Structures are given as C-alpha cells and as structure tokens.
Amino acid sequence: MEAERTSPGPEADLEALELVRAGDPAGATRLFQRWSTPLLRFTGRMLGDPAEAEEVTQDVFLKVIARASQYDGRASVASWLFAIAANACRDRLRRSARRPSVPLDAVAEAPGPDLPVDLRLVERQKREAVRRALSRLSDEQREVLVLARYHGLPYAEIARALSISEGAVKTRMFRAVETLKSLFSEGETPWNAASR
C-alpha cells in the first residue's frame, strides 16, 4: 500500500481526486505535492511574474477543491489541472491587460548536473535566450509549446486541456516553432530544437 503512494501516476491522481470529492484533505495534499511545481513552472512561463505565478497556482488548487465534482474523466487529472491553470493565466493576463515580459529567472528550473562555471554560464545564456523568445510568442502559441515541450503532454491531451481541436494544437505548435526559428536565426544564437 505504501509503495503505491510513492510512485504516483494517473491512477494515484484519480484516487487523490476522489479523496478531494469525499472531502478528505489528504487528496488535495497529494495533488499539491505532485503537481504544484509543474503548475508553478507553467504559470511562471505564461505570466512572466513569479509572484503572480505563485498566486495563480494556489488558486488552481483552491478551484480543484471547489470543483472536484466537475471533473468528468474525459481527460487525465493532469490535463484538467493544466486546463484550470491555463484559464487562470488567461484571466490574469486579460485583467492586467498587458503582455507578459517573461523575466523567468525566479521560476524554478530543474536542477542541472554539476557543470564547470563556464558551461553553467553558457547554459544560463541559452535559457535566457529561450525565455526572451518565449515572451515574443502569442499567448496561444506559448501555451501549446510550454505544455508540450516543458510538461510533455501529448497533443490530444493539450487539445482537451485547452478546449481546442488537435489540429489547432498542431497549427499553434507549428507557428510557435517557426517563430522561434526566425527569432533565433536573427540573432547569434542558432536554433536548436533541443534547447531550453
């Protein structure tokens, strides 16, 4: 029984959501422990402000608790969480009536290997170049790219999360990649699809 808790997956997410529906706070705690960091990274990349990202991420979990009964099982719990986060980010951007500047230095990055100082500097410069490029994408393109590239969601899940067709996901992804290619070909940093 204990091993199931330490190896979370879609089934564990569903179990946690059922606990939330039953009013058990342990379910919300499990979902928070599993998804708070990925959601914070997503909202950070979408909003460009670490404080706003943290606030929106907290709001996502409050909405999950309040709306657990609305989960219909058509998409994974992860997709449902990212859909709530994407909608919350759109609402926040509309309310603030500004384009995000995406200064994402404070958004947590996955820890990298112990690299020499010069290689760490190069990696940091690459991440900053990608962040600047992400800030120049449309909100729709950025959503799709971040969900696919940084969170590994398949196009079908992204389509369900954003309530759009899979074709629209592919179109937005294509346009995002083309925009990034042109941005990187303008500067000195060559385009590399593996760059983060």
Image (spheres, grey):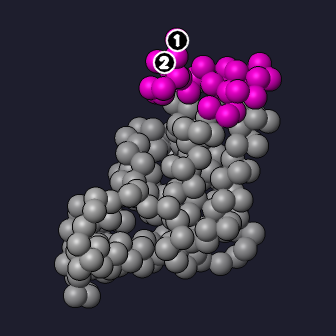
Image-based side of 22 in relation to 93, left or right: right
- As for residue 11 lying within the magenta part, the answer is yes
Answer above or below: position of 185 versus 71: below
Q: Which residue range is magenta in the image? A: 1-30
Q: Which mark is residue 141?
A: none
> Type of residue at label 1?
Met
Taking the spot 41% from the left edge, 43% from the top edge, the residue there is: 153
Taking the spot 32% from the left edge, 65% from the top edge, the residue there is: 196
Name the residue nearer the viewer: 99 or 192: 192
Per the image, the residue denoted by label 1 is 1
Q: Position of residue 99 (x, y in %)?
A: 59, 77
Image quarter of residue 132:
bottom left
> Type of residue at label 2?
Glu
Q: Position of residue 84 (x, y in %)?
A: 64, 46
| Residue at mark 2 to residue at mark 1: CA–CA distance | 6 Å
Image quarter of residue 145:
bottom left
